């Protein structure tokens, strides 16, 4: 891992743990640790005492250690984060509750009766499916534990919003594709929607409604509120699996989950609305 990769991953871990991004001094401590600088050199750069730098570094190592579940020190920073990138990469956020601008919360399981309803209906015919935006994953290995966890959250606990968070290139999309292949029969409708072009919320809603209602655009609701209400009506009556890929395009550049660009702030309300919907029986 190069310096920038380490800094990005460390920032992600610190933000997930504290709700705050790395400040300039914390970043300098990390960079200095990777480049074998002494704390005194960092102190000179920031015109502060070496003791102050050591205190900040100690707090930083503790935050990273708590986030990773293993001791992180100046001497093992790069190797520890490298293992994190390739092995312990999944950070799921269920129920999409906003806590310090990051979606991370656990939704309580539904009753056993609700779970039985879904399983008993899984052999009903699939109404429609659209995976045109999904990438072709010809080979997929492992991830058995992660798949089992996701299946439990979606099929058994029936979480309405599940997010896959992590560094770019670690296989989140491939995992999502494999998951869809294995659980799609449990739903009435399945659609994979790419957000690579950063569509406005009303554009996304139009695409979803066109597919779910099988109607042309001129027969769909016009205003954003009407479109959202219509989608909620559908979700209350049908079991729909909606996958939104490239979600990071909605966030401010250089920042992590939860920091929406101003033009996409209404997505926050959109997910909150879905989270608060009563699940179908």
Image (cartoon, helix red, strand yellow):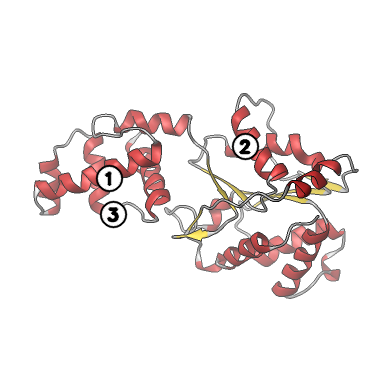
Question: Closer to the camera, 189 or 64?
Answer: 64
Q: Would you place residue 141 above or below residue 196 in this image?
A: above
Q: Which residue is mark 1?
A: 60
Contact? badges 2 and 3 (CB < 8 Å): no
Q: Nearer the viewer, mark 1 or mark 2?
A: 2
Q: Residues within 10 Å of mark 3 (few under 14, many from 20)?
A: few
SS of the residue under disc 2: helix
Label disc, if present, on residue 86 of the rendered structure: none
Tell which of 44 and 97 is nearer to you.
97
Q: Earlier along the polypeptide chain: callout 2 or callout 3?
A: 3
Which residue bears the numbered disc 3? 23
User: Residue beneath label 2, please?
Assistant: 149
Placement of the N terminus among the 4 image quadrants: top left
Q: Position of residue 265 (x, y in %)?
A: 55, 67
Image point (65%, 43%), residue name: 153
* Cβ atoms under marks 1 and 2 closer than 8 Å: no
Dot 2 crowding, Cα within 10 Å, few <14, some 14–19, many 20+: few
Numbered label tally: 3
Q: Give the residue drawn at x 61%, y 55%.
A: 197
**Residue at 17% from the left image edge and 47% from the top image edge:** 55
């Amino acid at each position: 891992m190069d310096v920038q990769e380490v800094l990005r991953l460390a920032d992600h871990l610190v933000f997930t743990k504290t709700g705050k991004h790395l400040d300039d001094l914390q970043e300098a401590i990390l960079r200095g640790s990777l480049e074998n600088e002494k704390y005194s050199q960092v102190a000179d750069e920031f015109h502060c005492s070496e003791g102050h730098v050591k205190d900040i570094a100690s707090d930083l190592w503790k935050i990273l250690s708590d986030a990773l579940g293993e001791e992180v020190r100046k001497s093992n920073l790069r190797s520890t984060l490298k293992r994190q990138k390739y092995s312990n990469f999944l950070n799921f956020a269920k129920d999409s509750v906003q806590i310090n601008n990051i979606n991370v919360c656990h939704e309580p399981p539904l009753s056993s009766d609700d779970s039985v309803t879904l399983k008993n209906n899984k052999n009903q015919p699939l109404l429609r499916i659209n995976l045109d935006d999904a990438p072709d994953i010809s080979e997929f290995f492992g991830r058995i534990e992660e798949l089992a966890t996701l299946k439990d959250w979606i099929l058994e606990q029936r979480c309405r919003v599940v997010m896959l968070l992590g560094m770019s290139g670690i296989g989140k999309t491939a995992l999502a594709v494999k998951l869809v292949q294995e659980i799609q029969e449990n739903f009435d409708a399945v659609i994979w929607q790419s957000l690579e072009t950063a569509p406005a919320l009303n554009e996304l809603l139009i695409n979803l409604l066109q597919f779910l209602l099988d109607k042309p655009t001129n027969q769909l609701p016009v205003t954003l509120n009407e479109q959202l209400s219509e989608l909620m009506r559908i979700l209350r009556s049908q079991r729909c699996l909606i996958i939104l890929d490239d979600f990071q395009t909605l966030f401010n550049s250089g920042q992590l989950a939860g920091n929406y660009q101003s033009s996409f702030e209404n997505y926050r309300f959109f997910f909150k609305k879905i989270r608060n919907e009563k699940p179908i029986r």
